[in-house]
Amino acid sequence: MSNRPDKTSEAAHLESANWTLTVLRALDWRSFEALSGEMFRRMGYWVAETGGGPDDGIDLLLKRGRKTWLVQCKRWRSRQVGIGEVRQLLGVVAARHAVGGFFVASGRYTRPAWLFGRRNGLDLIDGRRLLELVTGLEVPLYPEDGPRCPRCGVRMVARTVRSGANAGMKFWGCVRYPACQGSRPHCS
C-alpha cells in the first residue's frame, strides 16, 4: 500500500457504491444514517436527520403528509439487534405519537425481535433487505473531511494500492501512515 493519497478520488464524495454487507458495516455511523436517509427519500418520505448526541433512540424523522415515522439506525459489525432495542423504538414511537417506526440495521435481528416488531407494526430492515433498497444510490459516504481512522481517530485520505493482486483498488488510509496503518474499504 502506498502512503501517497490519490488526489483525484479524495475530493469525490458522491459515488455510486458497490454496496455489500462488508461495505455497509465498514461505514461510520454518520454515513450509515445518511445512506438510510437517502433510501427513505427514494421511497418518497421527507427526511430529517436528528444529528449526533442524545436522540432518544431516534436517528431519522420521516414525514409523508401529516403522518410521522421514527427511525433507529444500527450499524453493528457482529452483534444482532435484540428485542430490547426494538422495544425501545416502540416506546419512543408511542411517546411521540408517531404512526410507526423503522429499525434499520446492517446485520440481523434475533427471532424474538422480529416477532415483536411484526406484532407491533414496526418495520425491521436487516442488512440483506437494506442492500436491496440502496442498490444504485449515490450518497456522501463520509463527512466532507473524509472518514476517521478506526485505530487512532484522525482523518483518512483516499489511496490506491500500487502493486500486488489488489493493484488499482482504492481504500481509505490513515494520514499518519506508516506510524498508524489504519484503513477502511473505499466504496468505489
Image: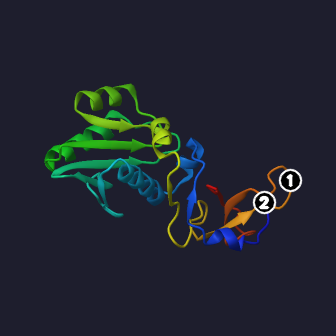
- In the displayed structure image, the side of residue 67 where residue 139 appears, left or right: right
Determine which residue is flagged by label 1. Answer: 164
Count of numbered circles on the image: 2
Which residue is painted at 24% across and 27% down in the image? 119
* Above or below, 139 relative to 118: below
Q: Position of residue 117 (x, y in %)?
A: 29, 32
Quadrant of the snapshot with the N terminus: bottom right
Determine which residue is flagged by label 2. Answer: 161
- Dividing the picture into quadrants, the one containing residue 184 is bottom right
- In the displayed structure image, the side of residue 81 where residue 128 appears, left or right: right
Asked which secondary structure carries label 2, the reply is loop
Residue nearest the viewer, comparing 38 with 143: 38
* Above or below, 95 relative to 128: below
Q: Are marks 2 and 1 in contact (CB under 8 Å)?
A: yes
Which residue is painted at 75% across and 68% down in the image? 178
Amino acid at pointer 2: Val
Which residue is painted at 61% across and 72% down in the image? 11
Label 1: how many Cα within 10 Å (few below 14, some 14–19, many 20+): few
